[in-house]
Image: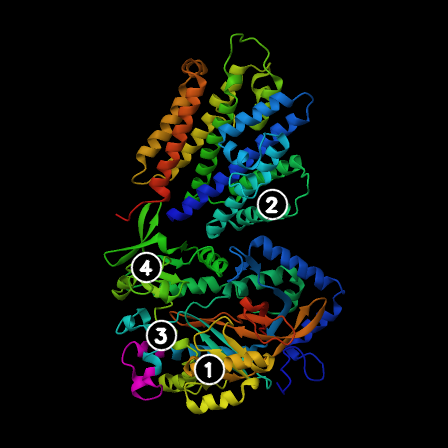
Amino acid sequence: MLSRTADHLFWMSRYIERAESLARLVDAHYRMSLLPHSGENLSQSLSSTMTALHMEDAYLKKYETIEPRTVFEFVSLDRDYSGSIVSCLRAARENARAVRGSLTSELWETLNSTWLEARSLVANLSPSPDIGHFVEWVKERSHLTRGVTIGTMMRDEAFHFTRIGTFLERADSTARILSAHQSDLVPGADASAVPDPYQWSVLLRALSAFEVYRRAFRDVITPLRVAQLLILRDDMPRSLLRCCKEVYANLRAVSNDQSSETERRAGEMHAMLHFTRMEEITAGGLPRFLEQFLARVRDLGDRIATDFLLPAAEV
Amino acid sequence: MGSKPYNEMTLSDGAARAHYMRYSQWLTDQPADRLAQKRAEADALFHRVGITFAVYGQEEGTERLIPFDIVPRVLPLEEWIRLEGGLKQRVRALNAFIHDIYHDQQILKAGIIPAEQVLCNSQYRPEMQGVDVPGGIYAHIAGIDIVRDDAGEFLVLEDNLRVPSGVSYMLENRKMMMRLFPELFSGHRVAPVDHYPDVLLDNLRSVAPTGVADPTVVLLTAGAHNSAYFEHAFLAQQMGIELVEGQDLFVRDEAVFMRTTQGPQRVDVIYRRIDDDFLDPLVFRPDSMLGVPGLLTAYRAGHVNIANAIGTGVADDKSIYPYVPEMIRFYLGQSPIIGNVHTWLLRRKEDEDYVLAHLPELVVKEVHGAGGYGMLIGPAASKAEIDRFRKQIIAMPERYIAQPTLALSTCPTFADRNLAPRHIDLRPFVLSGRDVTIVPGGLTRVALREGSLVVNSSQGGGTKDTWVLET
C-alpha cells in the first residue's frame, strides 16, 4: 500500500487512542473531584499528570492556576489546544478523510460522525459543560471505532498499520500515566502502609484496570501488584507487555526489505517485558525504567516512520 | 425569455407525460409530510457519509453538501437511445480531432477551423505533437453537458474533456433514492448505473502501454482540500485502485513508480484528476506541488498512459465548440445527431457587433471560464453589470462567446415545502477505451433558485437522480 496511506492510518488510530486515554484520565480525576476531601490529592494528581503529558505549559499560558474545572475543560474541549480531546478527534477524522478510500465506509462514517458531533457540541457549549457525560461519550466512540475497525476491515496492511498506531499510542499513554503516579508505586519506608485510596482509584480507573485488578488478584491493593498488573501482565489489555506484544506481531505482518532492525527492536522490547520480574524493575528504579521505556517507544515510532511511512528518497 | 420552457414532467394541459405517469400518480398519493421528512433524512445521510464539496473562496476547509433533490429526472428509452447515439458520435469525433491536431492537422489544412484558433490556444500543448497514445484515445472520460430547449430539442451546451467531475453524485444519488423510496424502484424499470466504476476501470486497463499484462492503475488527486476530493476517493475505492497524490509518485529511468510500504511499485495508467498545468513542474507550472517531475518524459516515451491525455483542452475550449458539428462531418462523414446551441464568436467582428447590440438578451461566457464563473446572463443582469461586461468585451472580444438565453427545460423540484419547476441540464459521462460506452442517464443538475439558469454546484445548483426507463 501507499506509504502515505499507511502514515494516515497509523496517525488516525493513534489520535483516536489518544482521545480515549485522555478521556479516561479526565474521567478518573472528575470522579475523584466528586468525592469529599479530595482537594489536595486531586490538584497534585492533576499537576503530575499534566507534567507527564507535557500539557502544563500550554495550560498555564491560558490559565493561572490548576483548577480541576478549567483543567477538565481545557483537556477535553479546547479547540485551540492541539492536544485536547476534540483536537484529537478532529485530527483522527482529518487523517481518515485523507485516506477514506482505504477505510471501510462504516469506519469512515464512524470517525466522521464522531467529529461532526464533537464539533457541534463545542460550537454550542454551555457555560458549565457536563464533562462526565462528554468523556463517557468519547470512550463510547472510541470503543465503537475500534469495534468497527476489527469488525469490518480486511486483515491486510491497512489493518496492521492501524493496529500498530493503536498499540504504540497505548504503550506510550500507559507509561506516562504510570510515571505520573510513580511515587505511589514505589514502596516507601513502610511497605505495608495503606496506600492512598484516591490515588489508586485514579490510576486504576484511568487505565480501566480497577475491575481487572480485583479479578486478577482477589486481594487488597498493593503498590507492587498494581505495577505488576500495568507493566507485566500479558492478559491486561493496557499493560506495557500487552501493547508491545501487539506492536511486534503487527509489525511482523507488514515486514519489508529494510524493516528488520525495527522488528528486532520491537521484539526485544516484548521479550524484555515478557521475561523480566517486577523485582528487577524496582531494583533499577521505576522512574528510570519508565523513562527508558518511553524513549524506546519514541525510537520505535521514528523507525516505523522511516521504514514504512515516509521513505526518504526513491533510490 | 419569450417562450415557455419545456416541462419534463407535464404536458401543457397539466397532465403527466407518458413516462412520468406512474411517478406522478405515486407523488399525489404521498402524505403531505412524507417528502419533507425524506428530504431531511437524505441530508443527514449525505452529511454522515461525507458526500461533500469544498467551496472555493470560502473559509479554509469549508465542506458543503451539494443539495440533492428527491424528485427524479426521468428519460424515456427512445429519447435516451437517440441521445446515446449522438453522444457517442460526438465523442468519437472529438477524439479524432485531438489526434489529428497533434499529428497531421488535416482539419486545419482543409480550412475548416482557422489554424491560429487551435495553435494559438493556451490549451494547445506543443509537447504532444507527434506523440502516439494507446488506442489513439485522448478523452477517455468525457462529460457532455446537454440542455433541452423550449421545443423539447436536446442540444449540447458544452463539452468537458479535461477532468470532468460529478459522476460520484450520479452514483450516490441513485443509492440515496433506492434507500429513501424503494417502492418506486419496484414500480419502475430504471436502468442501473452502478456498474460505472467497473466500466471505467476496464477502459483504463485497456489503454495501458503495450506489453503490460496486468496494468497498475492509480487515481491522481490534488488532495483532501480539492473541491472534488470526495469523488476522487470514492472512485478509487470503487475501482479498488490507489488514490495517489503527486508526492506519492516519482519517475526513474522514464518510468513512473509509487512509494509503497513494500518499496517502489511501477505504475502503468494514471487516471488524473488534476489539470495539465499542474502535472509536471519540469514542463508546465514550475511552482506546482501537485504533480510529478519527469512525468511528461515517461508519458512521451510511452511508459505510462495518462487519462485524460495531456492537451485535450484544445477540443473543449468554448472557442472550438462551435466547430464540433463540422468535426463530425469531417472525421465521421455523418451529420450530427445532437446539435449545438447557436454561438457567436466575438473574435469575429460581425458577431461582436451583433452581441454588443443585444447584450440584455444573451448569455456571454468567457472562453476559458468554467464552473459558471465569469459569465453574464443578459436577462437577469443589472444595467451596471451589462455595462461592465460591455467594457470587458470591447477591450478583449476574443475572450468571449455569446449564446441565446435558452429557456432550459424544467423539472418539478422540492422547494421549501412544495414542488415547483426549476431549470435543469444533464451531464452524461461518455467513456472511451475498448469501445465507447455510456452508463444510462448521467448527472442531472438543477438550478435551485427560482428562475435561475445556473446549475453549477459552485453557484448554488443541486442534483437529481436521473432515470432512464427500460420500458
Where residue B175 appears, as percent x and y from the top left, is: 58, 61
For the question of whether residue B313 can be seen, the reply is: yes
Q: Amino acid at mark 4?
A: Asp
Q: Which residue is mark 4?
A: B268
Q: Nearer the viewer, mark 1 or mark 4?
A: 1
Q: Measuring 58% from the left and 45% from the top, which residue is drawn there?
A: A114
Chain of the residue under label 1: B
Of helix, strand and loop, which one carries label 4?
Answer: loop
Q: Which residue is mark 3?
A: B122
Q: Which mark is residue B56?
A: none
Q: Nearer the viewer, mark 4 or mark 2?
A: 2
Chain of the residue under label 2: A
Could you give the CA–CA distance between mark 2 and mark 3, rounded to whole angstroms? 47 Å
Q: Amino acid at mark 2?
A: Ala
Q: Measuring 64% from the left and 25% from the top, which residue is drawn there?
A: A32
Q: Residues within 10 Å of mark 3 (few under 14, many from 20)?
A: few
Q: Nearer the viewer, residue B229 or A145?
A: B229
Could you give the CA–CA distance between mark 1 and mark 3, rounded to whole angstroms? 19 Å
Q: Which residue is mark 2?
A: A118
Same-chain status of marks 1 and 4? yes
Quadrant in the picture for residue A211: top right
Could you give the CA–CA distance between mark 3 and mark 4, rounded to whole angstroms? 28 Å
Q: Nearer the viewer, residue B230 or B453?
A: B453
